[in-house]
Amino acid sequence: MTIPFEAIANPEAHDEPTLRAQLAACFRLVAHFGMDDLIYNHISVRVPGSTEHFLINPYGLLFSEVTASCFVKIDLDGNKVEPSPHPVNQAGFVIHSAIHSAREDAVCVLHTHSEAATAVSALDVGLLPVSQFAMRYQGHMGLHDYEGVALDTDERSRLIADVGPHNVLVLRNHGVLTIGRTIPEAFILMYYFEKAARVQLLAQSAVAAGARLALPPTPVTEKTAQQFNDHHGDIRAAGSREWPAFIRLMDRIDPSYRD
């Protein structure tokens, strides 16, 4: 089945074949922007019309190898819903099943170990409002303390509690997780979190060399966060404007993600 560009580029797509193509494109984008970690990390999407089933990447494929047909469909207990020769990463199941089970709006859940985000997750101050990129997250992210590799299902209740109503969860000493009402929203939140983290680390390196860090007053930070999260009256999910350009980019680089 050939999914047309217009369907994959539509951020509001709701049918499974199109969501599979978008999810595969999202994996390729994470790899393209250097936020992947070999065969590890995971991105999942809820199966349309179901509250129990979601698609997740096979354990063993690089993000750059992922295609629309390769995903494993599992339920909230980790059982395969459809036959697949591929295993699923246990940590991926634990983390993603937690969020999908607790958040009706969690259509897409994206988790990375990207270098800058992971470095910031290890700082006691976390992500600071150093840049405009970072200000969108101020007051809009949860924090989950490190408990070891996420293999135990009892950690799910704490992940749920720590993310709360937010669409970003900083996993201390581990990485970051984003939640989207759409695949584009989860991706753009991850993209800009990583960008904000890189800017912060650059600024902090200058501080270590003797410079002084200038942070805006709290009311300005709060105003900026509100501006980003209110979307200026635009009811579309974040990432909607950028998504067609991302799909054009992926189609130019390697359209095999559609397979």
Image (tube, rainbow, N blue to C red):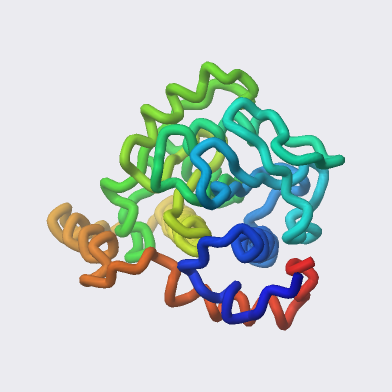
Residue 212 visible to an observer of this rendering: no
- Residue 77, relative to residue 204: is it above or below? above
In the image, is 13 to the left or to the right of 200? right
Q: Which quadrant of the figure contains the N terminus?
A: bottom right
Q: Which quadrant of the figure contains the C terminus?
A: bottom right
Where residue 258 appears, x then y in whole percent?
Answer: 74, 69
Q: Picture quarter containing residue 59?
A: top right
- Residue 188, relative to residue 151: is it above or below? below
Of 45 and 52, the residue lying toward us: 52
Of 184 and 78, the residue lying toward us: 78
Where residue 118 appears, x then y in whole percent?
Answer: 55, 43
Furthest residue to the front?
Answer: 49
Of 128 and 67, the residue lying toward us: 67
Q: What's the residue at 62%, 65% (across, down)?
A: 18
- Residue 56, relative to residue 225: is it above or below? above
Where residue 129 appears, x then y in whole percent?
Answer: 31, 55
Q: What's the residue at 50%, 25% (across, down)?
A: 156
- Residue 29, relative to residue 4: is it above or below? above
Where residue 211 appears, x then y in whole percent?
Answer: 37, 59
Q: Picture quarter containing residue 238?
A: bottom left
Q: Picture quarter containing residue 69?
A: bottom right
Of 124 and 51, the residue lying toward us: 51
In the image, is 24 to the left or to the right of 139? right
Q: How many marks?
A: 0
Q: What's the residue at 63%, 33% (across, down)?
A: 93
Q: What's the residue at 38%, 64% (across, down)?
A: 237
